[in-house]
């Protein structure tokens, strides 16, 4: 008789015997970047030649749709309906990757050839996001086989290929196909765990808001000897304006950007005891950010302000001139507890009140809205219990991840609770050279998802 434990052991056997690694290697070899023109055929091949035949064998009905926005990548949808009265889960992934950056990887590594070194699988898309959705579908395949071709639930899949270009077109597509994509819950994987060894469920994502700060003083540079000291230097004004937005330790001074009623009790409770770790490439600086908060509260429960870039004059070729202008491109990461529609007006009022009427705000707007399902939602509790049973240890629930994912699209148009179960970690270099997937968390992910799919079949 097949059992839950036996099926998890089967799936782990496939993982340990190299079955999963080989499958991932074949998919990493498809150069499906959406950021370098000329790879449209590779992107389509990922969906048509690799994903479609595989999931068709699992009994999915598959369709590949053109993106509602011209020039953006196709979207694959698939469904496997056993009985409309059974629970229906929607899962999601993206088959596109960022550009290869071939010349920047360490010697011996190639973005398009999966390479195993010291418990890591290096390759473009290994973590973001091929490794993650392929893991979940591989687990599904094992449950399907163990149950003799029946899952005991319905499943739908959305696999987009413009995620690395801001998921362009996904919102319109989901809105137009809301009836066909209807589901009870979204269970999907992307992004990092809170720490490599900590199984994590994230119930949303922070949003992103961008704006430029511009000090436009004069039409061209003027002689620094003849004018310097008596005419306004835009770089100095801009840096003072930024200093009025956040203090020397990164505490945000535009208090209207923060969660309206402070950090909600359920967010604080979910994050109690959540430990984050420094990586070789970045440290957690206890003095940085909102005083009195833990690192987890700062990145999962609060607003962050980041200066993405700033420029005045030409740093690569300075001349003896007072620069004509200075510009900074800035970002706010925020949770659903902040009112992003008021970010720009709050900033304008703040700059005026601090004596910076000449600092202009340009191109301000939300790039990706924040989303969150309550960490105490019944689907979240169910997933936590299932994973704890499979992994034999406790699961960290976070109210939203720090980075962005298009969860808001599914919340707005399908009204599904969000259960994100990330398999990667913060140090995976997913948008730079040397992207890799850690093997140990991936193996746990295989066990966790096999258990989840199994339990979902019992839920009805
Ligand atoms: Zn990415």
Image: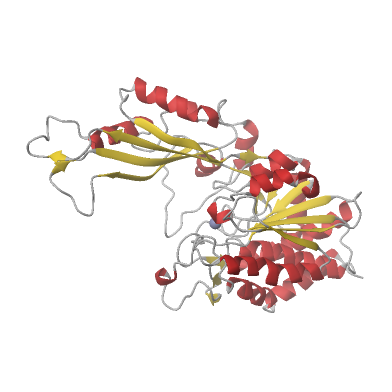
**9 horizontally vs 240: left or right:** right
Looking at the picture, tell me which residue is in the foreground, 246 or 170: 170
Looking at the image, residue 209 lies above or below residue 444: above
Judge whether 295 appears above or below 140 on screen.
above
Question: Residue 129's image quarter?
Answer: bottom right
Lateral position of residue 283 relative to residue 334, left or right: left
Report the residue that reaches farthest toward the top.
Answer: 353
Please tell me which residue is depicted at 39% across the width and 24% down the height of the picture: 350
**Residue 226 drawn above or below residue 442:** above
Residue 347 rendering spot, x and y as whole percentages: 42, 28
Which image quadrant is residue 392 in? bottom right
Query: Is any part of residue 143 visible from this angle?
Result: yes
Counting labels gives 0
For ligand 1, give the image quadrant.
bottom right
* Furthest residue toward left: 226
Q: Nearer the viewer, residue 311 or 120?
A: 311
Image quadrant containing the N terminus:
bottom right
Q: Nearer the viewer, residue 29 or 372?
A: 29
Residue farthest front in this picture: 70
In x, y percent, where is residue 359?
A: 32, 30
């Amino acid at each position: 008789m097949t059992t839950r434990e036996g099926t998890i052991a089967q799936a782990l056997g496939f993982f340990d015997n190299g079955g999963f690694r080989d499958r991932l290697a074949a998919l990493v070899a498809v150069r499906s970047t959406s950021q370098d023109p000329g790879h449209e055929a590779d992107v389509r091949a990922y969906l048509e030649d690799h994903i479609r035949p595989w999931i068709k064998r699992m009994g999915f009905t598959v369709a590949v749709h053109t993106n509602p926005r011209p020039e953006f990548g196709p979207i694959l949808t698939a469904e496997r309906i056993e009985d409309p009265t059974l629970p229906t889960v929607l899962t999601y992934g993206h088959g596109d990757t960022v550009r290869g950056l071939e010349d920047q990887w360490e010697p011996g590594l190639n973005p398009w050839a999966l390479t195993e070194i010291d418990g890591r699988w290096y390759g473009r898309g290994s973590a973001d996001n091929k490794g993650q959705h392929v893991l979940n579908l591989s687990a599904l395949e094992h449950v399907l086989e163990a149950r003799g071709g029946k899952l005991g639930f319905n499943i739908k899949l959305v696999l987009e290929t413009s995620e690395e270009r801001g998921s362009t077109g996904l919102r319109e597509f989901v809105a137009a196909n809301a009836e066909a994509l209807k589901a009870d819950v979204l269970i999907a994987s992307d992004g990092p765990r809170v720490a490599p060894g900590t199984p994590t469920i994230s119930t949303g994502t922070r949003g992103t808001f961008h704006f430029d700060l511009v000090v436009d003083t004069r039409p061209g540079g003027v002689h620094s000897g003849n004018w310097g000291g008596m005419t306004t230097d835009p770089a100095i004004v801009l840096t003072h304006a930024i200093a009025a937005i956040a203090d020397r330790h990164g505490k945000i001074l535009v208090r209207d950007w923060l969660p309206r009623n402070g950090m909600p009790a359920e967010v604080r409770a979910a994050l109690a005891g959540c430990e984050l770790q420094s990586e070789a490439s970045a440290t957690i600086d206890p003095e940085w950010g909102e005083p009195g908060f833990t690192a987890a509260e700062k990145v999962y429960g609060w607003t962050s302000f980041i200066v993405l870039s700033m420029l005045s004059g030409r740093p690569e070729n300075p001349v003896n001139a007072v620069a004509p202008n200075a510009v900074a491109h800035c970002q706010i990461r925020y949770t659903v507890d902040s009112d992003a529609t008021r970010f720009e007006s709050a900033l304008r009022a703040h700059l005026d009140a601090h004596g910076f009427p000449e600092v202009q705000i340009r191109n301000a707007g939300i790039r990706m809205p924040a989303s969150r399902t309550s960490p105490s939602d019944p689907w979240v509790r169910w997933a936590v219990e299932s994973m704890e049973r499979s992994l034999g240890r406790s699961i960290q629930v976070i109210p939203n991840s720090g980075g962005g994912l298009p969860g808001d699209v599914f919340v707005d148009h399908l009204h599904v609770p969000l259960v994100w179960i990330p398999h990667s970690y913060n140090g995976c270099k997913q948008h730079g050279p040397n992207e890799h997937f850690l093997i140990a968390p991936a193996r746990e992910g295989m066990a966790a998802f096999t258990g989840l799919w199994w339990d979902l079949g019992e839920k009805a």
